[in-house]
């Protein structure tokens, strides 16, 4: 866990240095929408953020499907385990033994 914090800190520092070194104004145009005097780093980081969000949507849907399948399979395993336990209990329970029939001899 500590290594993850170090990696995040290093990446955050790299992003901060990138933003400080690339602060030249630029204009951004998309279809009929236009922004003037946007810092270059801001435009690049906004595009990165949009890409991360767009990548996270299909991944979260896939993850949701896998979790639902895992829950269904866990339920099935519990059902099968209870069926096996009931079967084993029935097989291991001693049954009453009927007394042997009396053999009578006739003379």
Image (cartoon, grey):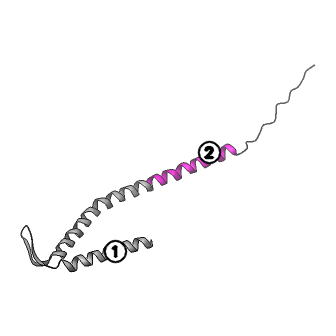
> Label 2: which residue?
87
Q: Residue at x 61, y 48 (%)?
A: 86
User: Which secondary structure type mostly characterizes the magenta part of the structure?
Assistant: helix
Report helix, strand or loop for mark 2.
helix
Q: Residue at x 15, y 75 (%)?
A: 40
The total of numbered circles placed on residues is 2
Q: State yes or no: residue 91 in magenta.
A: yes
Per the rendered image, the range of residues in magenta is 72-100
> Is 87 on the left or on the right of 9, as rendered?
right
- Residue 97 percent across, percent down from the top left: 77, 39
Q: Which one is nearer the viewer's eye here, 100 or 86?
A: 86
Q: In whole angstroms, how far apart are the C-alphas of marks 2 and 1?
A: 58 Å
Quadrant of residue 49 within the rendered picture: bottom left
How many other residues sit within 10 Å of disc 2, few (<14), some (14-19) or many (≥20)? few
- Residue 87 percent across, percent down from the top left: 62, 45
Q: Which one is nearer the viewer's eye here, 99 or 62?
A: 62
- Specify the farthest residue to the right: 107
- Residue 55 percent across, percent down from the top left: 26, 62
> Is 45 on the left or on the right of 89, as rendered?
left
């Amino acid at each position: 866990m500590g290594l993850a914090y170090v990696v995040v800190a290093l990446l955050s520092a790299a992003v901060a240095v990138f933003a400080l070194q690339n602060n030249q104004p630029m204009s951004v145009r998309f279809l009929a929408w236009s922004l003037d005097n946007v810092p270059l780093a801001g435009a690049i980081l906004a595009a990165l953020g949009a890409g991360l969000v767009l990548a996270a949507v299909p991944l979260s849907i896939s993850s949701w499907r896998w979790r639902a399948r895992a829950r269904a399979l866990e339920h099935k395993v519990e059902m099968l385990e209870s069926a096996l336990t009931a079967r084993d209990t029935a097989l291991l329970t001693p049954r009453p033994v009927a007394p042997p029939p009396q053999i009578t001899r006739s003379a």
